[in-house]
Image (cartoon, helix red, strand yellow):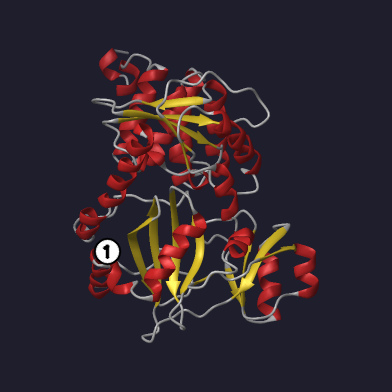
Amino acid sequence: MRSSDLPPSANRPAESALEATARGRELARAGRLDDALTAFLGAVERDDRILDAHLGIYEVAQILRRPELALAHQAAAIALAPVQSTRASEHEDYALLVPCVAGPYTANTPADLLFDAARVTLHRWYVDPAGPIPPLPPHDAVFVAIGESDDAAPHLAAMERFGARSSRPVLNRPELIRRLGRVPLAETFAAAEHCRVVATTRLERARYVADGFPVPHIVRPVGSHGGHGLTRIDDDAQRAAYLDTIDAPELFVAPFIDYSGADGFFRKYRIVFIDGEPFPFHLAISPRWMVHYYNAPMAEHRWMRDEEHAFLARMDDVFAGELHDALRETARLLALDYVGIDCAIDRDGKLLIFEADNALIIHLLDDPALFGYKHAYVPRILTALDALVRRRITA
């Protein structure tokens, strides 16, 4: 058989692990995620010491909804390098040590979306609370990215000890992050004058099965994020049906608050606080009570985008008077350098806070053709955060 009769792949020399990894990155950038995953998996089969191949699998597998595969290769990457650096591509203005915890994207502040990759070096340190501190690269400040969760509690405690000894400024003190849990958040705001955080109860499954909870209420598994497993319960039949589909050993339960407006639509605002100063990020409008930006029909309705545009341009028009005071009160009670809230305005005109989190995603990934106004206003958040870090470094 002549070589020209062979299939094209047979004429090519064997691809190295590094070449397969580079091809995976190209495929991922082109949106060919299944092909990218195949390339990354092939790379680690050839050489399981290729850090970027493991990281590529971690990133792509999450998008493809294969969390077990993603976390397995994240663990392999951390074993190879507990500190993973993304260096400034042009000129380094400063370097940040970014303590993280192993887990999905939602486990940590997405620092790569917040800082200019051309000027800022990020050293992601995956903290092992039971192990020794590895050699850490030189850095100008510490930006704690670990989000609040049961799994992260020992990591935050370890970072609290580390921060007390650090000679560099520490942004987002871990002891304050620990107060963002659904139960302690309501306790923090219990005496608030202008804000409302609905008290959340943590129940063992058996107790929820036996005793239920006053209806209407909302329920979700402990440790869930992004609305996964979140359901409104109006009667015992719905509660029984919910328990048939959820096997979580513990649940968060809270009264349901109808925060729909006079037009019947629900509005959820995301506001970010930088050194106590509030900045609008987005407004999601939906006919459904469980509002997430990804499932709100913002792309289908021009009037919704116009309202969001007005909110980003003139937040004080919406959050005026007592609501303006509520934002100031929120900043004071949370006291973090960088934190965001998902909130609404309830039927009494008060600020209703659903969640406070240092790991909320802030990005500029929306379609500029439909959401061009975001590209005008969201950069203010990034500029303010950059200025805060520079102030802390020079202080």
Residues 50 and 346: in front is 346
Above-or-below relation of 44 to 261 = above
Q: Among all residues in the image, which is located at the extreme bottom?
A: 262
Expressed as whole percent of the image width and height from the top left, the position of residue 117 reads: 30, 33
Picture residue at 62% right of the left edge, 33% below the top: 161
Above-or-below relation of 153 to 254 = above
Amino acid type at mark 1: Leu
Total numbered circles: 1
Picture residue at 38% right of the left edge, 37% below the top: 392
Q: Quadrant of the rendered structure where residue 12 is?
A: top left
Q: Do we see residue 35 in this rendering?
A: yes
Expressed as whole percent of the image width and height from the top left, the position of residue 126 reads: 54, 31
Expressed as whole percent of the image width and height from the top left, the position of residue 280 reads: 33, 61
Residues 198 and 242: in front is 198
Expressed as whole percent of the image width and height from the top left, the position of residue 139 reads: 42, 25
Q: Quadrant of the rendered structure where residue 140 is?
A: top left
Would you call the spot at circle 1 few (<14 residues within 10 Å), some (14-19), or many (20 or more)?
Answer: many
Q: Read off the residue under disc 1.
A: 312
Picture residue at 45% right of the left edge, 67% below the top: 343
Above-or-below relation of 24 to 295 = above
Residues 360 and 320: in front is 320
On the rendered image, what quadrant is the C terminus found in?
A: top left
Q: Among all residues in the image, which is located at the extreme front?
A: 395
Q: Quadrant of the rendered structure where residue 269 is?
A: bottom left
On the rendered image, what quadrant is the N terminus found in?
A: top left
Q: Do we see residue 148 in this rendering?
A: no
In the displayed structure, does residue 341 sit left or right of residue 75? left
Q: Is mark 1 on a helix, strand or loop?
A: helix
In the displayed structure, does residue 240 sit left or right of residue 76? right
Picture residue at 62% right of the left edge, 53% below the top: 223
